[in-house]
């Protein structure tokens, strides 16, 4: 294993260990940190009732998707609705106890309303009087009274309309907060009758893949932040209500202490008294006005009721904060589960990379100990490395993005794409079956493919390898080059096989005679030598050709040697064309050339000795 591979393996092991630690930590339940504490400044009560707790609960209820969250959302809706109901009661109490001081336009509208109400009362009395009189009267007098009753009834309707209009004007001017609060309470009740239901949102399926894990974690994080914010708002509201409670409680205690009649109900008196049943000395009631005592007692009782309402609102806000806290804890637990699964996926990816590095080094060492050719070793190493990388990338992409949703469609599109991309390999594979057939090629055959002639040395499922040689007119010696063809040539192209039908082929013998010699004896002798050497082979070739082309008349087909004589510069060229087997071509050619040289040598010797024999003796 190389140094870079070792360093990469060490880094991967460290990251894998960190992922395993994260898997262990996220697999264990842990406490969720408390939400942020509200600031010191509590929201001030406005002229209208604050319905924020209910609107917040309704908004968060739409986020409840799991069976664990929906009961919490329902309880949050109930508590928020109850708190808003208490807020309406408190607002109505406060509006009754502390009516606004009317000034300017509001005072004018109030005066107009009072006059209109008084006028309506007078008109109602008049209508009642006219009704009784009309019931007792008879004849023309009854008709006149009925007319008066109709006029009085119309006046009453007009006056009631003026009262209603004046009330609405007074509400808009802020002079009648109690009526405004009652109208808001009625709207709240009407909305409450429709039901406080949790949304029908369904949790999305837990899709595998790191991308989907990250999206799910972010969605849970956003939900958790909203829940913490709602919890902080509830805590802030509880704190503000507690401050109001303490202030009102102190005011009530002060009023009790200032009143001798109510002093015995003071908390301080009750705490300081050792025996609660011990009667407290009553003050002299003769010095107090009974009406004043009644007013003070009712005022203190009303404030005590307001304190009880504030206590209930504080408890409701605290319970609501606890519900939001529990809900946020549930979201945090699911968030930890998502992180746990994401870390498992990350660990698997690191494991895939580590295994790939291990097998790459192992294959490299294994091929280094083999006795194969260097080029074959490099080829095997490249193929193994590319295969490992492709498999590793596919598995890693599967872990990152997850399996495709439409697996059938994906496989169909992938198959179509691979068919187009691997068209040559597919056609080559089919061409291999053609080459294995009757009219195919075999190892050792001498063939011509796409203009390249050579001997078949390898015949694989996808490729054919030739050892290149010349064509039939050349020497035919191998050039040493290996030429590889895709087997698709068997289907899309054509090829020539010179090794079929007995492996017959034509060859040629060329001899040049110098000028001044009679060529006929040499021609006859050479033709005789070629005929003697190729007689048997020519007969066999003719028989095989005729049997191979039995469907056609081949009477003119002949394999006898043919001789061609033509003049050239410096002499006469004799070319003898003959048939031979492909594997005997070079041996027969060498034999015929040796015979031709011998004939030419004999002829030259006879020409030299003839003049010496016929010369005079002296």
Image (spheres, rainbow, N blue to C red):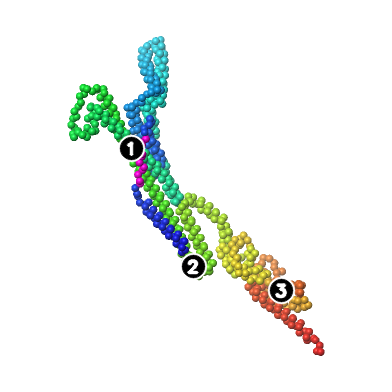
Secondary-structure class at tag 3? strand
For this rendering, which residue is in front, 414 or 395? 395
For this rendering, which residue is in front, 145 or 157? 157
User: Magenta span covers which residues?
Assistant: 32-43
Q: Quadrant of the C terminus?
A: bottom right
Badge number at residue 510: 3
Secondary-structure class at tag 2? helix
Badge number at residue 239: 1
Q: Position of residue 613 (x, y in %)?
A: 78, 86
The answer to whether residue 249 is seen in the rendering is yes
Main SS class of the magenta portion in the image:
loop
What's the residue at 69%, 68% (across, down)? 554
Is residue 36 one of those drawn in magenta? yes
Badge number at residue 103: none
**Front tag of 1 and 3:** 1
The residue identified by callout 2 is 368
Q: Earlier in the sequence, mark 3 or mark 2?
A: 2
């Amino acid at each position: 294993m190389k140094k870079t591979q070792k360093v990469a393996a060490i880094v991967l092991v460290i990251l894998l260990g960190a992922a395993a630690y994260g898997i262990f930590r996220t697999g264990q339940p842990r406490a969720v940190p408390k939400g942020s504490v509200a600031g010191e400044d509590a929201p001030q009560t406005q002229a209208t009732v604050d319905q924020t707790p209910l609107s917040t609960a309704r908004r968060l209820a739409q986020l409840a998707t799991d069976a664990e969250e929906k009961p919490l959302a329902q309880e949050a809706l109930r508590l928020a609705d109850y708190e808003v109901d208490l807020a309406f009661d408190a607002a109505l109490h406060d509006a009754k106890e502390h009516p606004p001081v009317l000034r300017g336009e509001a005072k004018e509208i109030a005066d107009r309303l009072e006059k209109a109400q008084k006028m309506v009362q007078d008109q109602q009395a008049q209508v009642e009087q006219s009704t009784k009189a009309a019931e007792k009267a008879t004849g023309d007098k009854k008709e006149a009274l009925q007319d008066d009753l109709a006029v009085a009834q119309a006046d009453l309707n007009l006056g009631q309309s003026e009262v209603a209009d004046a009330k609405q004007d007074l509400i808009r001017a802020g002079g009648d907060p109690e009526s405004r609060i009652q109208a808001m309470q009625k709207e709240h009740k009407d909305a409450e009758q429709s039901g406080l239901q949790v949304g029908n949102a369904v949790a999305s399926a837990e899709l595998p893949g790191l991308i989907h894990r990250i999206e799910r974690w972010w969605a849970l994080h956003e939900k958790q932040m909203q829940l913490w914010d709602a919890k902080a708002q509830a805590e802030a509201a509880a704190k503000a209500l507690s401050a109001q409670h303490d202030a009102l409680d102190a005011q009530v205690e002060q009023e009790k202490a200032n009143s001798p009649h109510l002093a015995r109900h003071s908390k301080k008196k009750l705490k300081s008294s050792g025996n609660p049943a011990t009667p407290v000395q009553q003050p002299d009631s003769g010095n107090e006005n009974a009406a004043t005592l009644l007013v003070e007692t009712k005022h203190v009782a009303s404030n005590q009721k307001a304190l009880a309402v504030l206590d209930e609102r504080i408890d409701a806000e605290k319970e609501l904060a606890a519900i939001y806290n529990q809900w946020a804890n549930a979201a945090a637990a699911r968030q930890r589960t998502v992180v746990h699964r994401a870390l498992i996926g990350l660990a698997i990816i690191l494991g895939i990379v580590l295994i790939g590095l291990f097998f790459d080094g192992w294959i490299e060492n294994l091929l280094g100990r083999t006795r194969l050719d260097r080029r074959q070793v490099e080829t095997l190493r490249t193929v193994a490395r590319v295969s490992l990388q492709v498999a590793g990338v596919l598995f890693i992409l599967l872990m990152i993005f997850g399996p495709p949703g439409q697996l059938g469609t994906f496989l169909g599109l992938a198959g179509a794409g691979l068919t187009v991309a691997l068209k040559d390999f597919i056609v080559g594979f089919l061409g291999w079956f053609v080459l294995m057939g009757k009219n195919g090629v075999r190892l050792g055959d001498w063939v011509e493919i796409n203009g390249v002639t050579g001997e078949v040395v390898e015949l694989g499922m996808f490729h054919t390898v030739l050892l290149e040689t010349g064509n039939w007119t050349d020497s035919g010696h191998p050039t040493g080059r290996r030429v590889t063809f895709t087997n698709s040539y068997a289907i899309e192209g054509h090829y020539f096989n010179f090794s079929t039908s007995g492996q017959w082929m034509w060859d040629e013998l060329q001899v040049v005679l110098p000028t001044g010699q009679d060529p006929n004896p040499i021609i006859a002798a050479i033709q005789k030598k070629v005929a003697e050497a190729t007689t048997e082979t020519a007969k066999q070739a003719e028989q095989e050709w005729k049997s191979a082309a039995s469907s056609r008349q081949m009477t003119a087909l002949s394999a006898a040697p043919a001789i061609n004589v033509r003049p050239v510069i410096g002499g006469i060229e004799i070319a003898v064309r003959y048939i031979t087997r492909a594997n005997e071509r070079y041996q027969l050619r060498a034999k015929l050339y040796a015979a031709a040289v011998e004939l030419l040598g004999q002829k030259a010797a006879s020409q030299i000795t003839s003049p010496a024999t016929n010369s005079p003796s002296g």
